[in-house]
Amino acid sequence: MFRRFQAAVAAFSASANTPAVPLDGSPSQGNLDVTAPISDWRRMWGDGEGGTSSADRLAAVYGCVSVIASSIAAMPLQLYRSSGDKRERERKHRLAGFLGDAPNEAMTWPQLREALLYTMILRGNSHSRQFWSGGFVREMFPLPLGTVTSKITDLRRVVYEIGTNPWKVPAGNFSKPDVAHFKALSADGIDGINPIKHCRLSTAAAAALATYGKNSAEDGQPIRGIITAQTTFKNPDQAKQVRQRWSEAWRGAQNGDGVAIFEGGDMKFHQVTMSMRDAQFIESMSFSVEEICRIFNVPPHKVQKLDRATFNNIEHLSQEFYMATLVPWIVRVEATLNQCLLTKGDREAGYYLRHNADGLLRGDLKSRAEAYSKMVGSALKTPNECRALEDLPPMEGGDQLLFPTNHVPLVKLGQELAPEPPSDP
């Protein structure tokens, strides 16, 4: 079985540059996966942007994509307006009402954003179709990646060709803001890079290891051990017969009650708890999880790999996850939404969309209390703003910024401490 694992990796690597062969002999349409399974790695992964693959079913891949998508989808998406140095949340704009309602009748905003983020993180691209009415967006639908193709016109404009899709969105050529294109890391600025295809060796090794472990569990690994005897075998054939009889007894135990009975005289079986091959397999599985975490820039503790996490650094690792992992995705999503949900007049008037990450960064009660105390004492937030973060009702007089009276400018402090001039007698 270990040879099968090596063969799977070798087949994947050797087939990485194999051209796609359409099932019907015709050219592939856009990014839709219509290629035939021409090798083991294509059967394992698929080669189409819109097709499914075993990458989705790897626990580490699913964990990385899920933790990013669900963390961002859990943040409230809110409309703000900036006017000079003043920035405040906008509640009266029609788009604010749309964000507080639902993007369509079939899903909520967190579900829509999870769907878009899942495809964007795993495939590098995702698309949505917006329907407008009276200058405002009234519906927004996600589109399967294989049904959308990016094209560049002679005027250097990007046009998206939409094909048949499950949402019954009319087919045709559309541009922004009717279509929103969410991209991951991009080499040309037009389409995002598929991380699974870009890091084929790491993902192929992880998939092959998973297949090897699955086959091992299904086939039933025999108990590895040593049979000792008080007497010496007369010839090699006698030793082979003993080993064959033990194997038959163990196979019968697998299909029965799990107890192997072997009549071997004064012979005794000594079980070995873990072979070196099993230990190497477990170590390789652990390494594959770390490799997948590197691909998606997710700390291993976020996919429940806690061998290097401690109670002292887990909070720091969570903050690093937000800054290094979530912020780049948040910036990409917000930039696209601002471009496709807001009109040019809205953007010129200072409107913009922003994810509120306060709930994600709140931490424990003690840390929140200390942070609120410092922010209120430094006039960064009002008491009512901090109460709102804890879902508490506002209090009277809590909308004013407070500042300690013992904080004075150094110049004024020097004037107060300077000795008074002597008075004339």
Image (cartoon, helix red, strand yellow):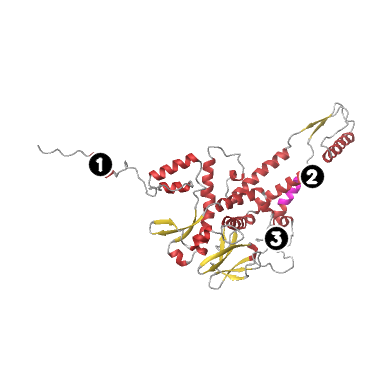
Image location of residue 342, percent across then percent down: 49, 64
Residue annotated with mark 2: 219
Residue 275 counted in the magenta span: no
Residue annotated with mark 1: 414
Residue annotated with mark 3: 18
Task: Find the distance from the CA under tag 3 to the CA under tag 2.
Answer: 32 Å
Residue 47 sits above or below residue 398 on the image: below
Among numbered discs 1 and 3, the one appearing first in the sequence: 3
Amino acid carrying label 3: it is Thr
Amino acid carrying label 1: it is Gly
Q: Are marks 1 and 3 in contact (CB under 8 Å)?
A: no
Q: Nearer the viewer, residue 125 or 188?
A: 125
Crowding at dot 2, Cα within 10 Å, few <14 / some 14-19 / many 20+, comes out as: few
What is the secondary structure assignment of the residue under circle 2?
helix
Q: Nearer the viewer, residue 195 or 312?
A: 312
Magenta segment boundaries in residue numbering: 1-9
